[in-house]
């Protein structure tokens, strides 16, 4: 019968391992197939930093005593471990918020006195605890035992290259996560079958927030677990509603980034049931919108929550607030998405089927909804940041005679205001429907742009002629191809030979790669009746309208700006 080593024995073995290992020799044991150049490349970009294990002390005091017995600093700081907590919760079917996993890193010198640590994950399991079966199973299976390499000077290109190199030699993606407590990103791998390093798992640790690269890593891991992946996907509606309710109740507005508040305290501020709010916050913690912390009171230790940078975007007063989008996607568009099957069966727009009219007319009849829609469009204004530096805009701003920009269906004037603020010599014209013009007039006046703005109330047939730059921002995806051709022809008819047209849209990838545009294409089909398109598709529509696509450049949030001119356009000097 196999004897299971005690926590103390495993801890002593890990300390000895960390003291003895050399980075290059350990990498060669871990990945036996590495050739010389590959090994040198890895040694140049990472170093062996620690060995890790999960222990189950009876108490905090017992853990500190165990550290001292192994010659480790007993007073080392303990921090929450989000990644291991969530992995344990998934494996054993427990609520993550009830697993208080901490991480300690007592220092251990390497063979040349280089700084290293033993990484200790600790879950306190007192005698008689319901978590005793978790401890027993984990001691046998050793899921969290691993060796780790810290990446020097991490950037997306380096991390992708290292991931590819490990995969080429048999390492398999095995989860990971971003820990906001220490601002570090963890990539876990299962060691290759022929590894001789003595550990079944490997960690790459990259200081900083690298969730973009992490997303691809986690996608590879989920692909190996189809049932779990599908189950998580099926709960997507819960996520939408949870975030929308947080925004609706203004819970983030009652929270702070640096101070934790108990659910009871928050419930009193926002008018909610304390127990129900606590459960919502626990789920929001899993989403990364809040962070749970222990809150010490005279009655004892209680769970409290503080806001994360992600959750802060749900505040009404946050810069770049996405609260209007949360309310829109969790409100009218959420209801109409429940009728997606109708759209797929009939080709009819689900929103029109549910509400009896298209979303433009429906929102126009309800001032509150109309305002929310305009604010939700403005909430994606990060799209516009690089547009002020587009060569077409900067060239127009540099002409001897002040140039004019026409924003066609420009909403509440958010984009036009940014262009005019960035370039004080530009003049602007906004074309919109009456209620939107009124809102835009107020916004542009508040931005100090009123003396350089004119307004045209009308439809696409009323595009003002003889301007220098025309802008269609997130307009064409609202319409089918025939309507798009008509809109583009109106623009082409209004444009003088020297004018440029800038179109802001998300482009569907032509190679099948993941993109927000693919999700928005489904949204447009279900709620609006429009569609997202590829760049070649837009090029054909432009050509049908007498325009030519000059090129396109990327913007944030998977958007692009497409630059078009008249087919027979000419460039004029000193326009």
Image: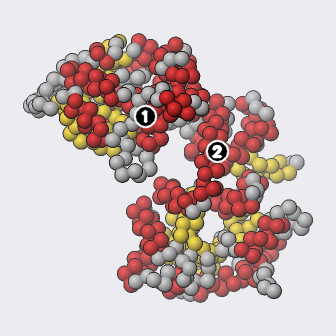
Contact flag, marks 1 and 2 (Cβ < 8 Å): no
Q: Is 9 placed above or below 357 here?
A: below
What residue is drawn where x is 52% and y is 25%?
351
Decide if residue 524 is in sight here. yes
Q: Residue tagged by mark 2?
A: 235
Residue 442 position, x and y percent, is 43, 17
Q: Is residue 299 or residue 550 the one in the foreground? A: 550
Between circles 1 and 2, the one closer to the viewer is 2
Q: Residue furthest right?
A: 128
Q: Is 396 placed above or below 40 here?
A: above
Q: Bin the neighbour count of mark 2 within 10 Å (Cα to Cα): few under 14, some 14-19, many 20 and up.
A: few
Q: Earlier in the sequence, mark 1 or mark 2?
A: 2
| Marks 1/2: CA–CA distance | 29 Å
Left/right placement of residue 501 relative to residue 223 reads left
Q: Is 335 placed above or below 358 here?
A: below
Residue 54 position, x and y percent, is 71, 71
| Quarter of the view holding residue 542 | top left
Q: Residue tagged by mark 1?
A: 381
Q: Is residue 384 or residue 234 the one in the foreground? A: 234
Residue 182 position, x and y percent, is 59, 59
Q: Is residue 342 or residue 358 the one in the foreground? A: 342
């Amino acid at each position: 019968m196999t004897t299971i080593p005690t926590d103390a024995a495993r801890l002593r073995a890990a300390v000895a391992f960390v003291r003895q290992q050399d980075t290059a020799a350990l990498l060669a044991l871990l990945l036996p197939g590495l050739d010389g150049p590959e090994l040198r490349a890895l040694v140049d970009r990472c170093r062996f930093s620690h060995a890790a294990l999960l222990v189950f002390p009876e108490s905090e005091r017992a853990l500190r005593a165990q550290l001292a017995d192994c010659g480790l600093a007993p007073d080392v700081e303990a921090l929450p471990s989000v990644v291991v907590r969530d992995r344990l919760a998934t494996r054993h079917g427990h609520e993550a918020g009830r697993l208080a996993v901490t991480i300690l890193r007592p220092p251990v010198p390497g063979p040349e006195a280089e700084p290293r640590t033993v990484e200790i994950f600790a879950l306190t399991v007192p005698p008689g605890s319901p978590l005793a079966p978790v401890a027993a199973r984990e001691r046998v299976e050793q899921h969290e035992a691993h060796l780790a390499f810290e990446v020097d000077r991490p950037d997306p290109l380096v991390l992708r290259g290292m991931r590819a190199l490990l995969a080429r030699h048999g390492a398999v993606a095995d989860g990971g996560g971003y820990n906001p407590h220490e601002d570090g990103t963890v990539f876990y791998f299962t060691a290759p079958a022929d590894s001789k390093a003595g550990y079944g798992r490997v960690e790459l640790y990259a200081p900083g927030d690298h969730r973009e690269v992490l997303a691809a890593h986690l996608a590879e891991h989920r692909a190996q677990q189809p049932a779990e992946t599908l189950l998580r996907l099926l709960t997507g509606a819960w996520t939408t509603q949870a975030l929308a309710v947080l925004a609706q109740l203004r819970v983030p507005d009652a929270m702070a980034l640096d101070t934790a508040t108990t659910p009871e305290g928050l419930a009193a501020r926002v008018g909610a049931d304390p127990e129900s709010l606590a459960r919502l916050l626990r789920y929001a913690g899993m989403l990364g919108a809040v962070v749970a912390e222990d809150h010490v009171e005279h009655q004892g230790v209680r769970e409290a929550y503080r806001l994360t940078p992600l959750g802060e975007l749900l505040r009404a007063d946050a810069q770049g607030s996405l609260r209007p989008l949360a309310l829109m996607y969790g409100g009218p568009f959420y209801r109409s998405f429940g009728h997606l099957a109708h759209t797929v069966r009939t080709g009819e727009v689900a929103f029109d089927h549910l509400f009896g009219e298209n979303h433009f007319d429906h929102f126009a009849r309800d001032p509150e909804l109309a305002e929310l829609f305009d604010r939700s469009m403005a909430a994606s204004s990060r799209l516009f940041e690089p547009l002020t530096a587009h060569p077409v805009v900067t060239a127009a701003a540099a002409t001897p005679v002040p140039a004019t920009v026409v924003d066609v269906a420009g909403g509440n004037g958010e984009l036009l205001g940014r262009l005019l603020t960035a370039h004080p010599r530009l003049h602007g014209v906004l074309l919109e429907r009456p209620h939107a013009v009124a809102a835009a007039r107020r916004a542009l006046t508040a931005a100090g742009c009123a003396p350089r703005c004119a307004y045209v109330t009308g439809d696409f047939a009323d595009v003002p002629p003889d301007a220098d730059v025309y802008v269609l921002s997130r307009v064409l995806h609202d319409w089918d191809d025939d309507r798009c051709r008509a809109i583009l022809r109106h623009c082409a008819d209004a444009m003088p030979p020297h004018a440029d047209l800038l179109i802001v849209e998300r482009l569907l990838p032509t190679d099948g790669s993941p993109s927000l545009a693919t999700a928005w294409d489904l949204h447009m089909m279900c709620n609006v009746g429009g569609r997202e398109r590829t760049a070649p598709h837009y090029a054909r529509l432009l050509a049908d309208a007498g325009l030519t696509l000059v090129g396109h450049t990327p913007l944030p949030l998977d958007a692009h700006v497409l630059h078009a001119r008249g087919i027979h356009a000419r460039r004029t000097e000193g326009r």
